[in-house]
Image: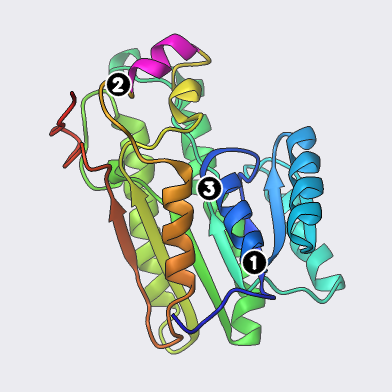
Amino acid sequence: MSNSVHGKWVLITGATSGIGRACAELFAKNGASLILTGRRAERLESAQHILEEKYGVKVRTYNFDVRQFPEAVKMANDLQESEIVPDILINNAGLASGKDKIYEGLISDWEKMIDTNIKGLLYITRAILPMMVERGEGHIINIGSTAGHIVYPEGNVYNASKFAVKALNEAINLDLVGTEIRCASIDPGACETEFSEVRFHGDREKAAKVYDGYEPLHPQDIADAALYICSAPPHVNITNMVIYPTAQRSAYVWGKK
């Protein structure tokens, strides 16, 4: 792979845990400067301090929820004033909330998923992509899910939100025809992060059972994939990467021990 990320600015949303935090670690290790966003200020500050000290890279942080478009615009304006254009945008912020049948679902869960997984991705992309277009280069990676490829029982609104991410990833690529800007989605299967704990509203015991009997993907696996995609030569656009743990072959087929 010839296109190193060393010295590039990488913007990662939802960078305080899971896949986002793993991406921050790996890209910093490879010499990238970081722009990290997240809702938890203490974790952001901790990540900034650790990564700067450990890898000697520049780290900027923005503490806000991606559901807040004015905050995304404020961040973009601040970057422009500092003459920083992200070379890579990793739209990682996302969540599942609840696992109920449609007729039992909580409206608050639905709104949280739609506003974060779809609108949040759109807000950040709308704020940052024009900067890439003006410069004429850049790379977007959207963290989707295999839930955007096949619907499973009680997935309903979460599935719908990830199907939307899949559609938006394809749409962004079409809109960028004729530019040097690339766009990819990475769609993981079962990956052990805080995902299940959030989905089950903080019930750690219930969340832990999701991964019983097999080894799921780890956040570092997805970070590896993101680095691979970004390291491809400029003429190569990897538009979609689907990753399952070896024990899982679809939403319905498992090889649990």
Q: Earlier in the sequence, mark 3 or mark 2?
A: 2
Find the distance from the CA under tag 3 to the CA under tag 1.
14 Å
Q: Determine whether 119 is above or below 40 in the image.
A: below
Say which residue appears at 46% left-offset and 86% top-offset: 234
Q: Determine whether 58 is above or below 2 in the image.
A: above
Q: Residue 215: which quarter of the image?
A: top left
Find the distance from the CA under tag 2 to the CA under tag 1.
35 Å
Relative depth, front residue between 215 and 153: 215
* Drawn side of residue 213 relative to residue 130, left or right: left
Q: Position of residue 84 (x, y in %)?
A: 77, 73
Instruction: Give the residue type that dot 1 points to.
Output: Ile
Q: Determine whether 101 is above or below 115 in the image.
A: above
Q: Residues within 10 Å of mark 1 (few under 14, many from 20)?
A: many
Say which residue appears at 60% left-offset and 38% top-offset: 17
Which mark's residue is nearer the viewer, 2 or 1? 1
- Quadrant of the image containing the N terminus: bottom left
- Residue that carries the numbered disc 1 in the rendered image: 128
* Residue 74 is a magenta residue: no
Q: Is residue 123 visible?
A: no
- Residue that carries the numbered disc 3 in the rendered image: 119
User: From which residue to which does the magenta span run?
Assistant: 203-210
Q: Residue 5: which quarter of the image?
A: bottom right
Q: Earlier in the sequence, mark 3 or mark 1?
A: 3
